[in-house]
Amino acid sequence: MNGRKVVLFANTDWYLYNFRLSLAEKLRQEGYEVVLLSPPGDSGPKLQALGFRWEAMPMNRRSLNPLREVGVLAWLVRFLRREKPDLVHGFTIKSAVYGSLASRMAGVPARINAVAGMGYVFTSRDLKARVLRPVVRQMMRFALNGRGSALVLQNPDDVALFRKARLVDDRSIRLIKGSGVDCSRFAARPQSGEDAEGPLRIVLAARLLWDKGIAEYVEAARTLKSEGRSVRFLLAGSPDEGNPASVSRELVGQWAGEGLLTWLGHVGDMPKLLSEVDVVVLPSYREGLPKTLIEAAACALPLVTTDAPGCREVVSRSGEDGLLIPVRDAAALADAIRLLDDDRALCRRLGLAARAKALSEFDETIVIGKTLRVYSDLLDAPRLDVGVANQSERRA
């Protein structure tokens, strides 16, 4: 037992359960005391049922009220002073910024700030997002620097963005591609005659946000159905009501009513869903590194995604392991789907190449191993700052 305590902090308990559970389990196996922290939700009790200590905190993802946000930060400082963790690992921009600020004020020795994609503020064209962008940049520049900190990014485009904007010291940046997928849970479906002759079944599986390319997906469905094609369009996911870019339930219901797509809602069993489809698409505007595409690749399914940050890490521009299309281009999406509908042998070739890449680059054993090396780099480095000295005194 190494006796060190780690806090994993995210803006939803759903994120911790779906994206960081394997990391938490590995940390526990390595002898760390693991505390999971997020606003309340349905996934918190699931984490507790697995034997983890999960704590709910009073953070509202959509809040822009300065007084409320100061209160959240003060709560977090008190929590960290009480817990005295050795390291805080914050996920997503808001949790990374708040977690890092509170950790510095509470004297936590090490901070890992994981930014998986640039989020609404950096991807949306809304006026509110454009107004907030310089403010958030300044907060990130202040919060994410300092001794004992590392910034984990998921794709080279985000690394270049942070370096160009000089948001953090270059030496603190680590590139780790994704949160990892347990590829052993996903298998290639044996080929059958139905794969070549039946209607092509396509799924977009994501939170229902406009910046996931939902509008382009619906428009592509409208185009191909108007041509009389039998392609089946499936949409898996729920609206993210805590995000300003969320698509409303009413609108999705309207699309389903028109016969453009079948809405599956939230799907908990992704291996089962992926075993029942032929193609996975994600026409996103920007990602960290999309887990859905990696899971689909592990099932040897052909991928259609955008030539956008994060997405092009999974699908190469060479076209050997999937099809890349321009961002916000519904016609190009329809063209790619039409190509796959007409050439099922191409579907198989792309899928097998995608699986080989997933196994060699994105399996969770690779990602978690790289993450634990960052933990060691920070926790085993000599500490000279006052904050740590103060913490040592509190522990004595």
Image (spheres, grey):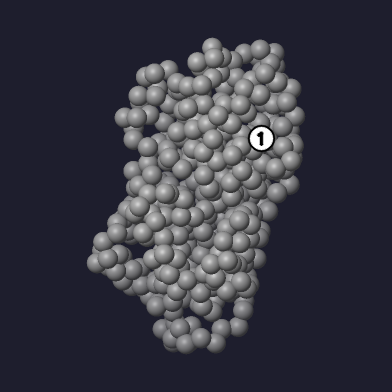
| Horizontal arrangement in the rendering, residue 206 relative to residue 375 (left or right) | left
Residue 375 visible somewhere in the drawing? no
> Measured from the top left, where is residue 50 in percent x and y?
47, 49
Q: Is residue 237 above or below residue 314?
A: above
Q: Residue at x 61, y 26 (%)?
A: 335
For the residue pair 323 and 347, the one nearer the viewer reads as 323
| Quadrant for the N terminus in the image | bottom right
Where is residue 364? Give x, y as percent: 63, 50
Residue 19 vertical placement versus 356 (above, below): below
Type of the residue with mark 1: Leu
Residue 154 vertical placement versus 347 (above, below): below
Q: Which residue matches tag 1?
A: 323
Bin the neighbour count of mark 1 within 10 Å (Cα to Cα): few under 14, some 14-19, many 20 and up.
many
The C terminus: image quadrant:
bottom left
Considering depth in this image, is 208 or 85 the residue closer to the camera?
208
Q: Where is residue 27 in the image (x, y as percent from the top left)?
A: 57, 60
Name the residue located 43 percent from the left edge and 40 percent from the top edge: 210
What residue do we see at 66% from left, 31% from top? 302
**Along the viewing direction, whichever of 214 and 96 lies nearer the viewer:** 214
Q: What element carries label 1?
A: strand
Q: In which quarter of the image is residue 135?
A: bottom left
- Please count the marks in the image: 1
373 horizontally vs 19: left or right: right
Dividing the picture into quadrants, the one containing residue 249 is top left
Using the rendered image of the protein, determine whether residue 312 is visible from the camera's viewpoint.
Answer: yes
5 and 63: which one is in front? 63
Q: Residue at x 57, y 22 (%)?
A: 201
Q: Position of residue 55 (x, y in %)?
A: 37, 58
